[in-house]
Amino acid sequence: MSVDMNSQGSDSNEEDYDPNCEEEEEDEDPGDIEDYYDGVANDVEQQGADAFDPEEYQFTCLTYKESESTLNEHMASLAATLKVSHAVAKLVLVSFHWQISEILERHKSNAAQLLVEARVQPTSSKHAMVHSSHHCAVCMQFVRKENLLSLACQHQFCRSCWEQHCTVLVKDGVGVGVSCMAQDCLLRTPEDFVFPLLPSEELKDKYRRYLFRDYVESHYQLQLCPGADCPMVIQVQEPKARRVQCNRCNEVFCFKCRQMYHAPTDCATIRKWLTKCADDSETANYISAHTKDCPKCNICIEKNGGCNHMVSNFCWMCLGDWKTHGSEYYECSRYKENPDIVNQSQQAQAREALKKYLFYFERWENHNKSLQLEAQTYQRIQEKIQERVMNNLGTWIDWQYLQNAAKLLAKCRYTLQYTYPYAYYMESGPRKKLFEYQQAQLEAEIENLSWKVERADSYDRGDLENQMHIAEQRRRTLLKDFHDT
């Protein structure tokens, strides 16, 4: 992955954006594999077209000050062009997701309508219906004219009611969404209108944070890092569902939806899948057991490694003879639809739907479990390398290919895990057949790699690195053909 990271740390924290805040070092979970996208490229890359990486994505990690500076530059430029205040310019930018070219186009064709759509100016008809009064429309008290405040809509309310309105909303976490109190009036309050109404510096600081959050979340090129208490902002040129990683807290996520990275499955599909898994978790629990009966001797066995190739030469998933899987096509990874199910009873269709879901869920869960078990293998490899180095049997560089093989295995299996939600929701047809074929090829090579990584001492470096290359090329081929671009 090619990454442009200009920022090396955070100038602030989420609570007060203290520029003197020092970065705290976080302890790594010894059970996790370090970022498996780093450090393995040299072992699998080839010259020419095969070196194309469909996940390559340029992004920059910005501190609070850097992202605030970027936002302010856009705001100041637009305010000068539209001849409005800075606060109003921010609301216009939020309404149009900071797409400045679109805003300028709309301003050129109809400047007044632009402000109406941005909810900073009322329509002319609504504006004409407002009548002057010295009564607050909320508390109905008679108020001196200088104590009545209103937005561009001219809905007048006393300062006390405005203060209470803004205070309650900010305490509830509202930023840009503070709006006029009049019924059916959607006008937003500019920040320079709200700040003087907040009674304490603490509340003003909260309001600043909520505004910043809303400005970033509305910007089509920016995303807040979802890491716990992390103030970093990720900036891209072209927003896509791609893998990004914060350089402060190391959180990895999908730029588009801020959830766990999920290629090749798209954001909407993975949301549906995770919701379904949560809703049907009790139904699926019984197939999540870690033990099965050996199909040859009927002894209860437990899977203690990531590889699905059991020592007794059968497949953990389908319990079939390992040799029958073939070198190119895994029958056990493809769900065989019942073509006559539409003509059967509703009960039969419901059973078929459950059967299909459990088929994909079991494989989804199995690869997740394999990732955890292979993390243990990774730790054993690290310990073995350390032992060899201490015994003068080579340097870390000499044995690093073993560590890289375990990282690449995790990288490939992670992608394979997310192919199952993709396949579950995919419509039957030629494209699904192609996907299942590539999925099966990837799965076969991952299992070969897993077998060799777990028995690394039995294979020479060239054999292992060749298997790494094949597995990564299968992964890239699938993503190139099916990952949403």
Image (spheres, helix red, strand yellow):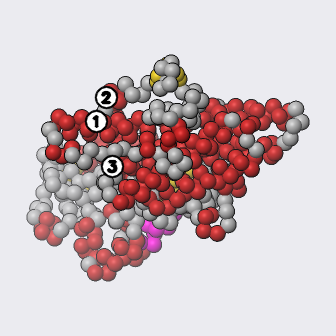
**Image depth: mark 2 or mark 1 in front:** 1
Q: Which residue is mark 1?
A: 354
Q: 10 Å neighbourhood of mark 2: few (<14), some, or many (≥20)? A: few
Query: Where is 95 relative to 336, above or below?
Result: below
Which label belongs to residue 283?
2
Looking at this view, is 280 or 153 the one in front? 280
Looking at this view, is 422 or 96 the one in front? 422
Q: Per the image, is 75 magenta?
A: yes
Counting from the top left corner in percent of width and height, residue 270 is at 38, 47
Give the number of marks. 3
Earlier residue among tags 2 and 1: 2
> Mark 1: which secondary structure?
helix
Counting from the top left corner in percent of width and height, residue 263 is at 47, 52
Question: Could you tell me if the residues under marks 2 and 3 are in contact, i.e. CB atoms within 8 Å?
Answer: no
Q: Main secondary structure of the magenta part?
A: helix
Type of amino acid under label 1: Leu
Q: Can residue 64 be spotted in the picture? A: no
| Residue at 33% from the left image edge and 39% from the top image edge | 357
What whole-number distance in Å separates the C-alpha atoms at marks 2 and 3? 19 Å
Magenta-drawn segment = 70-78
| Residue at 61% from the left image edge and 40% from the top image edge | 450
Looking at this view, is 34 or 427 the one in front? 427
Q: 10 Å neighbourhood of mark 1: few (<14), some, or many (≥20)? A: some
Q: Can residue 118 be spotted in the picture? A: yes
Type of amino acid under label 2: Thr
> Mark 3: which secondary structure?
helix
Type of amino acid under label 3: Tyr
Give the position of the N terminus as an image quadrant: bottom right
What whole-number distance in Å separates the C-alpha atoms at marks 2 and 1? 9 Å
Which label belongs to residue 425?
3
Earlier residue among tags 2 and 3: 2
| Residue at 61% from the left image edge and 60% from the top image edge | 2
